[in-house]
Amino acid sequence: MSETTQAKARLNEIQKEANALQKEATSSFEQLMAMAERAVEIAKLARKSRIRLETLNAEALYLSLSEGLEWNEVDTPESPPENLDRIWKSLRAELLPVTAQGDWLEKIRNLEKDRSEKPFLTPEEREALELRLKENVCPICVSFSLDGSCTLEAFETCPITHYLNRMVAIVEELGHRPWMEDYFERMYRDVCPGCSGRVDKNYCPPREDGECSLFTYLPSVIRTIEEFMKERDQAQSSSM
Ligand code: SF4
Ligand code: SF4
Protein backbone atom coordinates (compact mmCIF):
# COMPACT_ATOMS: atom_id res chain seq x y z
CA MET A 1 0.00 0.00 0.00
CA SER A 2 1.42 3.44 -0.94
CA GLU A 3 1.89 6.13 1.70
CA THR A 4 -0.95 8.18 0.18
CA THR A 5 -3.34 5.20 0.31
CA GLN A 6 -2.35 4.52 3.91
CA ALA A 7 -2.84 8.18 4.77
CA LYS A 8 -6.26 8.17 3.09
CA ALA A 9 -7.33 5.08 5.06
CA ARG A 10 -6.07 6.65 8.29
CA LEU A 11 -7.87 9.93 7.48
CA ASN A 12 -11.12 7.99 7.08
CA GLU A 13 -10.60 6.33 10.45
CA ILE A 14 -9.76 9.69 12.04
CA GLN A 15 -12.85 11.28 10.48
CA LYS A 16 -15.12 8.60 11.99
CA GLU A 17 -13.53 8.74 15.42
CA ALA A 18 -13.40 12.57 15.40
CA ASN A 19 -17.11 12.80 14.49
CA ALA A 20 -18.02 10.41 17.31
CA LEU A 21 -15.84 12.31 19.79
CA GLN A 22 -17.33 15.63 18.72
CA LYS A 23 -20.83 14.23 19.39
CA GLU A 24 -19.73 12.85 22.74
CA ALA A 25 -18.09 16.10 23.84
CA THR A 26 -21.11 18.16 22.71
CA SER A 27 -23.46 15.87 24.60
CA SER A 28 -21.21 16.02 27.71
CA PHE A 29 -21.28 19.82 27.61
CA GLU A 30 -25.06 19.80 27.22
CA GLN A 31 -25.38 17.46 30.21
CA LEU A 32 -22.96 19.60 32.18
CA MET A 33 -24.93 22.77 31.44
CA ALA A 34 -28.21 21.05 32.38
CA MET A 35 -26.64 19.82 35.63
CA ALA A 36 -25.18 23.26 36.38
CA GLU A 37 -28.58 24.86 35.83
CA ARG A 38 -30.17 22.20 38.04
CA ALA A 39 -27.48 22.84 40.69
CA VAL A 40 -28.38 26.55 40.67
CA GLU A 41 -32.07 25.68 41.07
CA ILE A 42 -31.28 23.37 44.00
CA ALA A 43 -29.05 26.02 45.60
CA LYS A 44 -31.91 28.52 45.28
CA LEU A 45 -34.33 26.08 46.95
CA ALA A 46 -31.80 25.40 49.71
CA ARG A 47 -31.35 29.14 50.23
CA LYS A 48 -35.10 29.63 50.46
CA SER A 49 -35.36 26.84 53.09
CA ARG A 50 -32.43 28.27 55.05
CA ILE A 51 -33.92 31.77 55.09
CA ARG A 52 -37.25 30.33 56.30
CA LEU A 53 -35.43 28.28 58.97
CA GLU A 54 -33.52 31.35 60.20
CA THR A 55 -36.77 33.32 60.31
CA LEU A 56 -38.51 30.56 62.30
CA ASN A 57 -35.54 30.36 64.68
CA ALA A 58 -35.71 34.13 65.22
CA GLU A 59 -39.47 34.02 65.85
CA ALA A 60 -39.09 31.07 68.23
CA LEU A 61 -36.25 32.77 70.07
CA TYR A 62 -38.33 35.92 70.46
CA LEU A 63 -41.30 33.91 71.85
CA SER A 64 -39.10 31.88 74.17
CA LEU A 65 -37.42 35.03 75.50
CA SER A 66 -40.56 37.08 75.86
CA GLU A 67 -42.57 34.29 77.52
CA GLY A 68 -39.75 32.53 79.38
CA LEU A 69 -40.27 29.33 77.43
CA GLU A 70 -37.67 26.84 76.35
CA TRP A 71 -36.62 26.62 72.71
CA ASN A 72 -33.90 24.48 71.19
CA GLU A 73 -32.66 26.26 68.15
CA VAL A 74 -32.59 24.18 64.96
CA ASP A 75 -29.23 24.73 63.23
CA THR A 76 -29.27 26.15 59.72
CA PRO A 77 -27.02 24.03 57.48
CA GLU A 78 -24.17 25.92 55.79
CA SER A 79 -22.48 24.56 52.69
CA PRO A 80 -18.78 24.14 53.50
CA PRO A 81 -17.05 26.80 51.31
CA GLU A 82 -13.84 24.76 50.97
CA ASN A 83 -15.82 21.94 49.29
CA LEU A 84 -17.41 24.34 46.84
CA ASP A 85 -14.03 25.92 46.04
CA ARG A 86 -12.48 22.51 45.42
CA ILE A 87 -15.32 21.42 43.11
CA TRP A 88 -15.30 24.76 41.28
CA LYS A 89 -11.53 24.58 40.76
CA SER A 90 -11.73 21.02 39.38
CA LEU A 91 -14.57 22.03 37.09
CA ARG A 92 -12.68 25.06 35.78
CA ALA A 93 -9.58 22.93 35.19
CA GLU A 94 -11.58 20.39 33.16
CA LEU A 95 -13.13 23.15 31.06
CA LEU A 96 -9.86 24.85 30.10
CA PRO A 97 -9.00 24.84 26.35
CA VAL A 98 -7.26 21.68 25.23
CA THR A 99 -4.31 21.02 22.94
CA ALA A 100 -3.28 17.99 20.94
CA GLN A 101 -1.05 15.45 22.63
CA GLY A 102 2.11 14.01 21.13
CA ASP A 103 4.41 15.76 18.68
CA TRP A 104 1.83 16.50 15.96
CA LEU A 105 2.02 20.28 16.36
CA GLU A 106 5.81 20.14 16.12
CA LYS A 107 5.53 17.98 13.00
CA ILE A 108 3.06 20.44 11.44
CA ARG A 109 5.39 23.38 12.20
CA ASN A 110 8.31 21.56 10.61
CA LEU A 111 6.23 20.69 7.56
CA GLU A 112 5.16 24.32 7.15
CA LYS A 113 8.76 25.48 7.58
CA ASP A 114 9.93 23.06 4.88
CA ARG A 115 7.17 24.24 2.57
CA SER A 116 7.88 27.92 3.15
CA GLU A 117 11.54 27.38 2.36
CA LYS A 118 10.91 25.49 -0.84
CA PRO A 119 10.39 27.63 -3.99
CA PHE A 120 6.74 27.48 -4.91
CA LEU A 121 7.11 27.70 -8.68
CA THR A 122 9.78 26.90 -11.22
CA PRO A 123 10.24 29.55 -13.97
CA GLU A 124 8.29 27.30 -16.38
CA GLU A 125 5.46 26.85 -13.91
CA ARG A 126 5.30 30.57 -13.31
CA GLU A 127 5.07 31.21 -17.02
CA ALA A 128 2.27 28.65 -17.36
CA LEU A 129 0.39 30.13 -14.42
CA GLU A 130 0.71 33.67 -15.77
CA LEU A 131 -0.74 32.46 -19.05
CA ARG A 132 -3.61 30.76 -17.22
CA LEU A 133 -4.33 33.97 -15.30
CA LYS A 134 -4.30 35.99 -18.52
CA GLU A 135 -6.86 33.60 -19.99
CA ASN A 136 -9.09 33.60 -16.90
CA VAL A 137 -8.82 37.12 -15.54
CA CYS A 138 -7.92 39.55 -18.33
CA PRO A 139 -11.19 39.04 -20.28
CA ILE A 140 -13.21 40.09 -17.22
CA CYS A 141 -10.91 43.00 -16.31
CA VAL A 142 -11.97 46.61 -16.98
CA SER A 143 -8.46 47.34 -18.31
CA PHE A 144 -8.74 44.70 -21.02
CA SER A 145 -9.28 46.20 -24.46
CA LEU A 146 -11.00 44.62 -27.42
CA ASP A 147 -7.71 44.10 -29.24
CA GLY A 148 -6.50 42.01 -26.31
CA SER A 149 -4.08 44.56 -24.89
CA CYS A 150 -3.96 45.90 -21.35
CA THR A 151 -4.78 49.58 -20.81
CA LEU A 152 -3.92 49.71 -17.12
CA GLU A 153 -2.17 52.98 -16.30
CA ALA A 154 -2.01 52.98 -12.53
CA PHE A 155 0.85 50.43 -12.49
CA GLU A 156 3.68 49.55 -14.82
CA THR A 157 3.05 45.86 -14.24
CA CYS A 158 -0.32 44.30 -13.52
CA PRO A 159 -0.53 43.76 -9.72
CA ILE A 160 -1.60 40.16 -10.31
CA THR A 161 1.70 39.45 -12.08
CA HIS A 162 3.75 41.66 -9.80
CA TYR A 163 2.58 39.93 -6.62
CA LEU A 164 2.12 36.46 -8.08
CA ASN A 165 4.81 34.75 -5.97
CA ARG A 166 3.36 36.14 -2.78
CA MET A 167 -0.17 35.14 -3.77
CA VAL A 168 0.95 31.60 -4.60
CA ALA A 169 2.63 31.43 -1.18
CA ILE A 170 -0.59 32.63 0.47
CA VAL A 171 -2.67 29.99 -1.33
CA GLU A 172 -0.14 27.31 -0.35
CA GLU A 173 -0.06 28.48 3.27
CA LEU A 174 -3.81 28.89 3.72
CA GLY A 175 -4.88 25.79 1.81
CA HIS A 176 -8.43 25.84 0.48
CA ARG A 177 -10.67 28.22 2.43
CA PRO A 178 -14.38 28.59 1.81
CA TRP A 179 -14.32 32.30 2.68
CA MET A 180 -12.67 34.86 0.42
CA GLU A 181 -12.31 37.11 3.46
CA ASP A 182 -9.35 35.00 4.62
CA TYR A 183 -7.50 35.65 1.35
CA PHE A 184 -8.32 39.36 1.42
CA GLU A 185 -7.00 39.60 4.96
CA ARG A 186 -3.76 37.88 3.98
CA MET A 187 -3.42 40.14 0.96
CA TYR A 188 -3.86 43.26 3.15
CA ARG A 189 -1.32 41.83 5.58
CA ASP A 190 1.32 40.38 3.25
CA VAL A 191 1.04 42.29 -0.02
CA CYS A 192 -0.46 45.76 0.45
CA PRO A 193 2.05 47.14 3.02
CA GLY A 194 4.85 46.93 0.41
CA CYS A 195 2.78 48.23 -2.50
CA SER A 196 3.24 51.74 -3.91
CA GLY A 197 -0.50 52.03 -4.59
CA ARG A 198 -1.37 52.43 -0.95
CA VAL A 199 -1.37 55.91 0.56
CA ASP A 200 -1.92 54.79 4.12
CA LYS A 201 -3.12 51.78 6.04
CA ASN A 202 -6.76 52.42 5.25
CA TYR A 203 -6.60 54.20 1.93
CA CYS A 204 -5.51 52.83 -1.42
CA PRO A 205 -6.58 54.99 -4.43
CA PRO A 206 -6.12 52.24 -7.10
CA ARG A 207 -8.24 49.92 -5.01
CA GLU A 208 -10.95 52.57 -4.58
CA ASP A 209 -10.85 53.41 -8.30
CA GLY A 210 -11.03 49.76 -9.44
CA GLU A 211 -7.50 49.90 -10.81
CA CYS A 212 -6.00 47.19 -8.64
CA SER A 213 -6.72 44.04 -10.63
CA LEU A 214 -5.44 41.92 -7.77
CA PHE A 215 -8.01 43.32 -5.36
CA THR A 216 -10.89 43.51 -7.85
CA TYR A 217 -10.47 40.01 -9.26
CA LEU A 218 -9.03 38.26 -6.23
CA PRO A 219 -11.64 35.42 -6.26
CA SER A 220 -10.74 34.52 -9.87
CA VAL A 221 -7.02 34.87 -9.13
CA ILE A 222 -7.27 32.54 -6.11
CA ARG A 223 -9.38 29.99 -7.97
CA THR A 224 -6.93 29.96 -10.88
CA ILE A 225 -3.90 29.55 -8.60
CA GLU A 226 -5.64 26.80 -6.61
CA GLU A 227 -6.54 24.84 -9.71
CA PHE A 228 -3.07 25.29 -11.16
CA MET A 229 -1.34 24.13 -7.97
CA LYS A 230 -3.70 21.17 -7.64
CA GLU A 231 -3.00 20.04 -11.18
CA ARG A 232 0.74 20.55 -10.67
CA ASP A 233 0.73 18.51 -7.42
CA GLN A 234 -1.28 15.72 -9.08
CA ALA A 235 1.14 15.66 -12.02
CA GLN A 236 4.10 15.57 -9.62
CA SER A 237 2.69 12.73 -7.49
CA SER A 238 1.68 10.62 -10.50
CA SER A 239 5.17 10.98 -11.97
CA MET A 240 6.79 9.67 -8.74
S1 SF4 B 1 -4.74 44.85 -15.48
FE1 SF4 B 1 -3.93 42.78 -15.27
S2 SF4 B 1 -5.79 41.54 -15.28
FE2 SF4 B 1 -6.37 43.52 -16.09
S3 SF4 B 1 -6.17 43.31 -18.30
FE3 SF4 B 1 -4.25 44.15 -17.51
S4 SF4 B 1 -2.96 42.34 -17.23
FE4 SF4 B 1 -5.07 41.64 -17.39
S1 SF4 C 1 -5.10 46.92 -2.91
FE1 SF4 C 1 -3.78 48.70 -3.15
S2 SF4 C 1 -2.04 48.29 -1.85
FE2 SF4 C 1 -3.08 46.36 -2.17
S3 SF4 C 1 -2.08 45.46 -3.94
FE3 SF4 C 1 -3.81 46.60 -4.71
S4 SF4 C 1 -2.98 48.58 -5.20
FE4 SF4 C 1 -1.50 47.60 -3.89
Image (cartoon, rainbow, N blue to C red):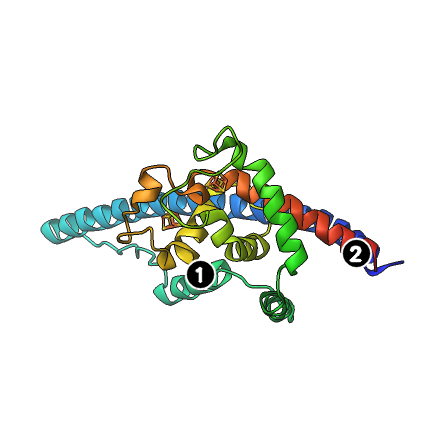
Name the amino acid type tagged 1.
Arg
Q: Is residue 52 left or right of residue 23?
A: left
User: What is the C-alpha distance between the residues marked 2 and 1?
Assistant: 48 Å
Query: Quadrant location of the N terminus?
Result: bottom right
Question: Which label number is shown at residue 92?
Answer: 1
User: Residue 30: image x %, image y %?
Assistant: 52, 43
Disc 2 on helix, strand or loop? helix
Mark 2 against mark 1, which lies toward the viewer? 2
Please name whichever residue, 85 or 146, is drawn nearer the observer in this view of the structure: 146
Residue farthest along the top direction in this orientation: 146
| Residue under label 2 | 237
Residue at 47% of width from left, 39% of height from top? Answer: 150
Residue at 45% of width from left, 53% of height from top? Answer: 186
Disc 1 on helix, strand or loop? helix
Examine the image and state in which quarter residue 71 appears: bottom left
Residue at 55% of width from left, 57% of height from top? Answer: 169
User: Residue 123: image x %, image y %?
Assistant: 64, 59
Question: Which label number is shown at residue 146?
Answer: none
Q: Is residue 239 left or right of residue 89?
A: right
User: Residue 228: image x %, image y %?
Assistant: 66, 47
